[in-house]
Image (spheres, rainbow, N blue to C red):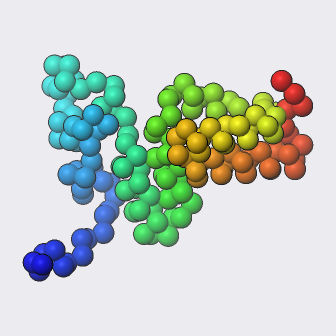
Amino acid sequence: MSRDAQRPSPPLSYPLGKHHPERLHTPTGKTLEALTFQAVLDGRVTSEDLRITAETLHLQAGIAESVGRTQLAGNFRRAGELTAVSDERILQIYNALRPGASTRDELLAIAKELEEQYGAASSAALVREAASVYERRGILSDSH
């Protein structure tokens, strides 16, 4: 093993785009360097290229955690899980999480969907927690 392979990699620092642009890629695999105004004008950059990736969010979570921002790190990880969910479904889930908008069973069904269809265990746990808190506070929907 070479000396370089034994050396630990330096910790990541924020902002990633400034300090570690080589680690960032679009969902279609383009590098940060490829996202230029000219590329947009030429049609080489699409809206899909402007979406954040789960990998980038997990890198940001690692940075947040390394400086003791554990709640922010958890938020980044949940956001990373949700990159697999369509924008339309995210908005439906957001609306369902409004106090009084859903029954306990509806929220638990959303949690199950997040976990089973998207592998979003942390996000599912958050929805289950919301269902429990809403139930204790009496702010669940009576029925639909």
Residue located at (38% from left, 40% from top)? 52
Residue located at (27% from left, 47% from top)? 24
Above or below, 81 against 102 in this view is below
42 left or right of 127 in image: left
Above or below, 57 against 11 in this view is above
Q: Residue furthest left?
A: 2
Q: Quadrant of the C terminus?
A: top right
Residue located at (50% from left, 70% from top)? 68
Question: Could you tell me residue 97's position as x and y percent?
Answer: 71, 37
Q: Quadrant of residue 30?
A: top left
Q: Quadrant of residue 83?
A: top left
Question: Could you tell me residue 14's position as x and y percent?
Answer: 34, 58
Question: Could you tell me residue 34's position as x and y percent?
Answer: 17, 36
Q: Quadrant of the N terminus?
A: bottom left
Question: Could you tell me residue 67's position as x and y percent?
Answer: 44, 69
Residue located at (37% from left, 42% from top)? 53
Query: Does residue 97 show up?
Result: no
